[in-house]
Amino acid sequence: MLGIAASMTVLAGWWFDIPAMRRIVPGQPPMVVLTAVGTLLLGSSLTLASLGGPFRAARLVGRCLAAAAVAVGFGGVLRYVPPGQIRLDDWAQRLVFGPLRPDAGMALATAASLLGSATGLLVQDARSRWLRRLSTPATLWGLVLAAVGGLAYAYSLDAFHQDGLFSRMALVTAVTLAVLSLGVLFSRPNRPWIATVLGTGDAGALTRHLLPAVVLTPLLLGWLQLQAVRAGLFEAETAAALLVILLTLLLAALAIRLARNIDRRAAAERQLREALQGMNEALERRVAERTSELAEAQDALVQAQKMEAIGQLTGGVAHDFNNLLTVIRSSTDFLRRPDLPAERRRRYLDAVSDTVERAAKLTAQLLAFARRQALKPEVFDAGDRIRGIAQMLDSLTGARIRIGTQLSESACLVRADPVQFETALVNLVVNARDAMEGEGTLTIAMTCGGPKPSIRGHAGSPGPFVAVAVTDTGSGIAKEQLARIFEPFFTTKEVGRGTGLGLSQVIGFAKQSGGDVDVASVVGRGTTFTLYLPQTQAAAGEEKPVPEPEGEALEDGDQCILVVEDNVEIGRFCTQILHDLGYGTVLAQTAEAALAEIEAVPFRFDAVFSDVVMPGMGGIELAKRLRDIHPEMPVVLTSGYSHVLAREDAHGFEFLRKPYSAEEVGKVLRAATARRPKVRPTPTDA
């Protein structure tokens, strides 16, 4: 606005022929009309260029005015280009006032300053990057020329304006162009130099602190030097030396001041780092303490959940076993009566036997859920097993439930325990029957060769898998209960209608066989349980023939069984069963003792009946040792629970689960000894 006001004042002074308005500063040369027009265009363009985005039309007009200012500056320069016939300043002067005197007109420095500042304003928003970079140097060029012209007046260098680049440059022109150049520079505060000066950071504060001393102090000292020389106080050389000394002292003081500022800032930064480090350490301690508290709370929660699960499990086991023990104890109490009729005695004995079978089944279901049951895996066709079991499902489900099967025509072979497979299917069918309340449609579908999907967050497997889906049209399972249906003793049925162990056996068998169980249910429409088991190929190769021992064949006669059992009571009970079955027995309480008995008389025993879990050498290790040294010796293993058998299998040996009956013992021993070659020891062996 200052540039516009000065320009219009000068133009009014020429138009109305008022000399004071042409000069503005009394006693100084006037500003010519062409210079006033150029500064007016530049000031107006700068004012319009400073408007924001909503005034795009005004900014476009501003750029046009800047281009006109560039043209005025360029026209002023043409006067000094040979042959110098273009006098644009004279033409403009004639339009307003009259012809210029021969010694008057626009100075070359004025034209160059106006041209630089106007060019900088014109290209500062150009699309081309190199044109935008040209803006600051061009504007600085105009500022330097105007500042030099103004300083010449400040230092009273009259000869400076008599000839050369700055001849005829008025003081009002120099001041006006300097102000406009600064305005152009600061009109775009995002420019690198201007951003440094106006920045809010450390660089901006330091620059604003040093600029007055660095710029104004040398100018002031130079002015004082000239005045002292002109007044005769100092010689020119002495004044120059004093000026150099003062400037040196000034620069030294500024350097020390800057160093002190840097030192104070470094000290403040150190204090800040120490404070931040202390806060960081305190935060880390609090995080560690909080993490420890959360870990303890998590452990406590996990422990509480474990105790709740154990409580539920033990409660269910205690409830069912107490019921079973009640039947056994009541029956034994009646059996002690001497006058008990034979019919009732037989009834109580049958009740005890049936209750023991139910207890064994309950234990097997618990071991199945825990994946600790001893399996007897075989390779079989799942489709054939389903067809075989489907024939007896009618009696299990009732006449009002329609049963349909959708099976693959090709063989779908799996390697699993066939008895447990059938038990799992029966458990799924029983659950479906109860969900349909005895009426509906039950569908058993089987596919093979497909992948196993992701189930309950566990990663899937590409397969191949055999999938057996059991679908009912019952009431469905609520969403909030789906996560608990496989827990032992959890049931949604009424009291007395189920133990809550059926699905536990299914998922335990599936997991232990390398598969899984998926469930999908819609309340009111039905449920689908899908059992996934790894598909396998048919077993290849034949069994290796058992080497025939040397000697003559033995005649049939009494057989002797080596019983290996660390529990004395069970060992005595087992030998009594074998005696009743007509076998001779020898009891050994450790595997080492059993090996000693066999090595003493190698052909004394017809079979070995051994427990699996024993102190020292276990039953499986004993059986493997005997297979190496006496491959003709049959070995039958027995156990109520063994983690080795649960993790693997019986390693090719016959296996009998505890509790066992005399009939089961006799059956497994007859099968084992029937495969043993009947031989007689050679004379040397005898």
Image (cartoon, grey):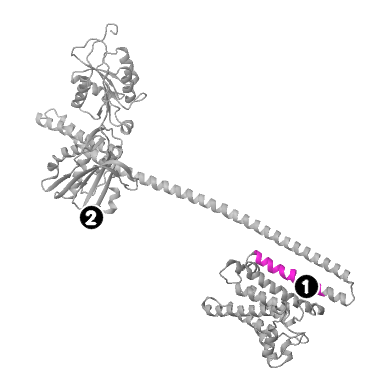
Residue beneath label 1, please?
A: 219
Pinpoint residue 370: horizontal percent, then vertical percent.
Answer: 31, 39
Residue beneath label 2, please?
A: 523
Point out the image quarter for the C terminus: top left
Q: Earlier in the sequence, mark 1 or mark 2?
A: 1
Q: Is residue 211 visible?
A: yes
Pinpoint residue 39: horizontal percent, then vertical percent.
Answer: 66, 81
Does residue 601 lie above or below 367 as drawn? Answer: above
Q: Is residue 325 visible?
A: no
Segment tinted magenta in the rendering: 202-223
Q: Which is more foreground, mark 1 or mark 2?
A: 1
Pinpoint residue 303: horizontal percent, then vertical percent.
Answer: 39, 45
Left or right of 371 on screen, residue 208: right
Left or right of 642 on screen, residue 256: right
CB atoms at circles 1 and 2 under 8 Å apart? no
> In the structure shown, which secondary structural element does the residue marked by tag 1 occupy?
helix
Give the residue type at disc 2: Val
> In the structure shown, which secondary structural element does the residue marked by tag 2 occupy?
loop
Q: Residue 9 versus residue 572: which sits nearer the camera?
A: 9
Q: Quadrant of residue 671?
A: top left
